[in-house]
Image (tube, rainbow, N blue to C red):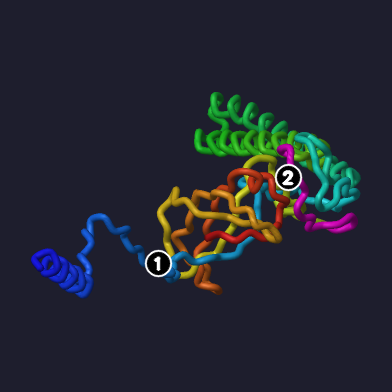
Amino acid sequence: MTIGLLAGWLTVALMAGGCSKPAMKDPRLQSPRVEVFKAKAVASNSRTFTGIVEARVQSDLGFRVAGKILERSVDVGQRVQKGQSLMRLDPEDLRLSAAAQQANVEAARAKYTQAKADETRSGMLVKSGVISPREYDQDRAALDTAKGQLDAAEAQARVSNNSSEYAILLADADGVIVRTLSEPGQVVAAGQTVIQLAHDGPREALINLPEGVRPDLGAIASARLYGQDQMYQASLRQLSDAADPASRTFEARYVLEGEAASAPLGSTVTIT
């Protein structure tokens, strides 16, 4: 009897335990949940400008004397060495000019000789009282004027005699011919630009920046050559203080680094 009651109570207890709520797990033992979000692109304040590759130094070359071009020895894109002949003037015109200057020297010398003789004669006459000191002073002044004119004529003749050397236009540095502005047969003035020469050395990106965009000198930017994905470093070397009257933009020059530093002249480049 007693054993039966105990068995009954045990069965009831087990059934009651089976109907109870499951025990709560310790949250510290559970794996943390991680939520993943897709990042949205943030608008960039950077701007891109397009320009061209230029040499840092470019010479505008011209003859030191006027004359008619007889020969052009180079073409656009041709590499040249310092001292190489680029163009030559017709020497006949220079020879005639030298002859004319020499004739001026002879005329000035004759005038000086006459003025000197007059001054010597006046000096003797003024001592004997035949003429007044004022008349002597006039002859002395005429001698000084004639001497100055002779000196000027001789100096001009020396320049004209050296013009045969000036008839040959030489490259002032190693580089590349980027433009020819005159052709054989054309008459040019002294100092007129006839050839543009880009010197060897660092390449720069020439960019025109709009108003309101004025980075600091030395500012770092990214440069990309046309048709390439590779980006190169560039630093701002020069920024114009005056805007172009027509475009209202400011000329900026960025020094190119890496392979971009040897990019062909005139290549398209973008600066960001």
Q: Which residues are magenta?
A: 172-186
Q: Amino acid at mark 1?
A: Val
Question: Alpha-carbon neighbours of circle 2 within 10 Å: few (<14), some, or many (≥20)?
Answer: some
Locate residue 251, reporting x and y percent: 53, 61
Q: Along the line of sight, which residue is nearer the eye, 131 or 93?
A: 93
Q: Amino acid at mark 2?
A: Arg
Q: Quadrant of residue 226?
A: bottom right
Q: Is residue 87 visible?
A: yes
Q: Residue at x 56, y 48 (%)?
A: 255
Q: Secondary structure at mark 2?
A: loop
Q: Earlier in the sequence, mark 2 or mark 1?
A: 1
Residue 36's disc is: 1
Q: Residue at x 43, y 71 (%)?
A: 40
Question: Magenta stretch: residue 29 in it?
Answer: no
Q: Which residue, given by chain and number where applicable, does mark 2 sit on?
A: 64
> What secondary structure predominates along the stretch shown in magenta?
loop
Q: Quadrant of residue 184?
A: bottom right
Q: Say above or below: 229 vs 18.
A: above
Q: Say above or below: 191 vs 43.
A: above
Q: Say above or below: 73 vs 239.
A: above
Front label number (2 vs 1): 1
